[in-house]
Image: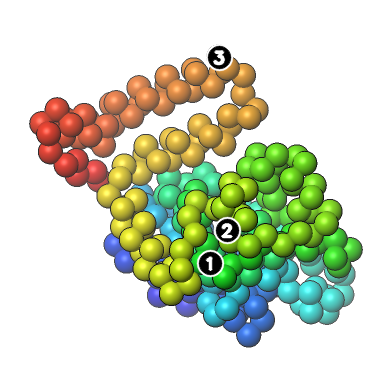
Amino acid sequence: MTDYQTITLEQAGPVARITLNRPDAANGMNDTMTRELADAAARCDTPATKVVVVTGAGRFFCAGGDLKDFAAAPSRGRHIKGVADDLHRAIATFARMDAVVITAVNGTAAGAGFSLAVIGDLVLAAESASFTMAYTRVGLSPDGSSSYYLPRLVGIAKTKELMLTNRTLSADEAYRWGLVTEVVADAALAERADELAEKMAATAAGSNGGIKALLLGTFSNGLEEQMELEGRLIAQRAESADGREGVDAFLAKRKPEFG
């Protein structure tokens, strides 16, 4: 386990688990947490890691930015910009790594916690989890990539509703809106996350990373450009060790053993 102050990072084979670990502060994000989260994401961005699970300690996933920490800063704007920059660095790394990122939302996800929750490639939510933007409640505006991901996940109208009215979604509502992959019983969340992580760890990391890269650009590329990217990537995958193993295993009617 890496020695951090506000998070924990545990590695078990190809699976890494990052836990937001300020339960007495509702896992609120201060400058230390976002800096450590960016560092942990970078540590996970290696061929040795095929799955990253992100969750929270205690009753909260993450209640967003630590307002007490922000208020104590000599320059609030400069301080918050630094916190946001580190959070954004972490999220950009999660988005572009080959590893499948699973967010296991164990409780309230508010503000930047909401933003972090829905960047998962697969999002698991405990039945008691809830999701709310909450930024305008304190006179702030969204960060953590929510203005990028939410319109793509739920559309502009629903994004405006979430951001302007601070509507709170239950786990079931978030699932129906398309923000969550699966809702599980509170007591089963960790076990389900481990089960899904084990399943993803047996897959081809390069294929997973390719899917992530293709989908990240799909709304900004034209049809021909996107298809060219698809063609180039599938050709690269066909020449890779995992691509050869997958095809050979299929033809031999055996289970593939990816690197």
Q: Position of residue 97 (x, y in %)?
A: 47, 47
Amino acid found under the numbered disc labelled 3? Glu
Q: Which residue is painted at 43% across and 50% down in the image?
A: 100
Amino acid found under the numbered disc labelled 1? Glu
Instruction: Count all numbered tags in the image, as a single digit.
Output: 3
SS for callout 3: helix
The residue that disc 1 covers is 127
Q: CA distance from mark 2 to mark 3?
A: 38 Å
Image-based side of 154 in relation to 201, left or right: right
Q: Position of residue 238 (x, y in %)?
A: 29, 26
Q: Name above or below for residue 31 compared with residue 244.
A: below
Disc marking residue 172:
2
Residue 183 in sight: yes
CB atoms of marks 2 and 3 within 8 Å: no
SS for callout 2: helix
Q: How dense is the environment of label 3, judged by Cα within 10 Å: few (below 14), some, or many (20 and up)?
A: few
Amino acid found under the numbered disc labelled 2? Asp
Q: Nearer the viewer, mark 1 or mark 3?
A: 1
The residue that disc 3 covers is 224
CB atoms of marks 1 and 3 within 8 Å: no
SS for callout 1: loop
Q: Position of residue 153 (x, y in %)?
A: 63, 42
Q: Name above or below for residue 122 compared with residue 56.
A: above
Query: Dividing the image into 4 quarters, which one contains the N terminus?
Result: bottom left
